[in-house]
Amino acid sequence: MEKKIHLKTALLSLIAITMSGLVISCGGSLDSSIFQMQLVNYLKKDMPVVTTYSDKYAAYFDFSGVYIAYADPQTHQTFNDLTQKITGNAESFDIYSLANADIQELSGANSPAKLFQMLHDSNNQGQKWAPIERTLQKISDEGRPALLVTDFEEYTKEGVIYRQAYATPYFEKWLSRGGDIQFYITDYLEGGLHKHLYYVIFDYNNHRLGKLVAEALERSPQNYKTFMLSVNSYPMSTAYPSSSKGGTYHDENGEDLVSLSVEDGSGDSFFMIDSLRAESYCFDAPWQDIVTNSKDQTLSNGVQTPFRHLFGNLFIDLSHSDSYNIKSMGVVVTDVEKDFTLFNNYNTAIQNKPKKEKDSDGVYLDWTGHEAGQQFYDDKGNLLPEYDYPKNKQTPRVIKDMLVFDNNLFTSSKAKDSKHAELAINFDPRFTGSIVGESEEGKNNLLRIDIVVTDAEICSQEKINSLFAWDGNDCLSSAIRNVLQEMKPIGKPVYSYFVRIR
């Protein structure tokens, strides 16, 4: 049967196809906004999909033997301040008690005073068998930010403490989601045995729950130590000349005389995607000229601000990098043009599927409101094979001997101020501007430049033991050590630049 297309639909489809072609090149503000959206979608495709059980936070309180810790006045004050904050925001929390092998939701969500009383009622404390492992499984399965207050002592019904590292898979699952786990650790004495009580925050990069807990403890006694279990949770900052000018070279007048980009804020020469740790640049000079221009920006040529780096003035805060000591980084450059285009065509197609309608002539495809997807489907409404991204996903070509990471600057700036270690990229001395294996057709392809971790060591065993173990109980310290060894961030991107030649 002939495919029915209204004139309006056909015209809109032509416009969509034309715009699709424009987005591939560096262009005006309209193209820039579309490209930004495409780049965000492209970056998010590699991120774990987090589906949460509820919009509320979860808070779990161990009602077994940890009540002994509250006999210490400072620990009692810390616990009091925390529970005041949580019950004062009871509408934002589901609150649970852990005892008698059961995870029991506490009633009284509409009464903060009642919840507070239940958390402090001595008659509820000192019960048995807090199901810590099942709680960790619940937290990791649900995916929502959660607070857990416990000593991590998991008992069998025979009264024997588990000695296995039972927390390992649940910690790993949370970290693999892109989250991190922050520990507030207080000490207490039980029958002459020195133990630890933990306030554990399972959170994501926005750290909303973590900030709430930090606010709760602002006026509390500083009787705790902290530890951040994280694979890649490092605050980033920049010192760029302005919001329209990025981290590329600028001379003493603020001009880019290397890539020759026009940075007036109206086009797509530069933009940042802070939440995804990425930036995009459109250079106006070819790579050969960029390399030549960089070599000309010297003191001997009368330049007051000589060229130092292709990208710089990007800083990473490693002051709270409890989990790993990042010793060195590197650069990986890939040509992502084909993969980027294929993914975004597929994404457009999936979001613009036709509706199958019926009339007196039979079944036809209705493209109303989804004209942008028309070019990707056949007459029966099936996705054309060449646009099936999951089946045709490209492996981006690695470009070698083009860029290098300045590890000397990183090491020296980190030693000077771990909150302000600089990340900078320069040309490989062997790079002349000609990319090996690049055809004339691919000359202006989209390049992805990732700063990746090349060497990192986990924190000391002594530190792990002091915070997460005591006589007769090393299950938590073993879990922390296992996670750190298994999830070492070697090869993981810390920051990404996307570059196209105009």
Image (tube, grey):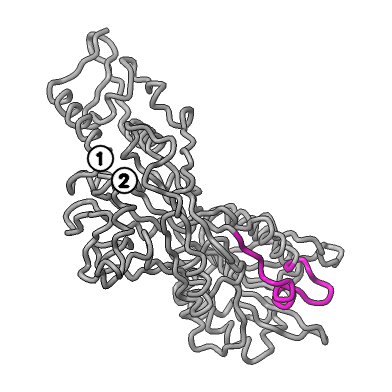
- Which span is picked out in magenta? 455-477
Which residue corresponds to the image point at 49% horizontal and 89% vertical from the top-left?
219
Q: Distance of mark 2 from mark 1, alpha carbons?
A: 8 Å
Q: Position of residue 331 (x, y in %)?
A: 48, 54
**As rendered, which of 95 and 55 lies closer to the eye?**
55
Q: Crowding near pointer 1: few (<14 within 10 Å), some, many (20+)?
A: some
Q: Position of residue 153 (x, y in %)?
A: 75, 69
Q: Quadrant of residue 38?
A: top left
Does the image show residue 75?
A: yes
Kindly identify which residue carries mark 1.
25
Is residue 60 in view?
A: no
Under mark 1, the amino acid is Ser
Which residue appears farthest toward the bottom when viewing the image? 73
* Up/down of 293 relative to 151, above or below: above
Q: Amino acid at mark 2?
A: Arg
Q: Residue at x 14, y 26 (%)?
A: 11
Label at residue 65: none
Q: Nearer the viewer, residue 99 or 325?
A: 325
Q: Is residue 366 above or below residue 339?
A: above
| Residue at x 34% of width, y 52% of height | 291
Q: Are marks 2 and 1 in contact (CB under 8 Å)?
A: yes
Residue 270, percent from left and from top: 27, 55
Residue placed under numbered mark 2 in the picture: 500
Residue 474 among those drawn in magenta: yes
Q: Is residue 24 above or below residue 146?
A: above
Residue 45 versus residue 348 in the image, above or below: below
Q: Which residue sits at x=69%, y=88%?
A: 71
Q: Is residue 21 left or right of residue 8?
A: right
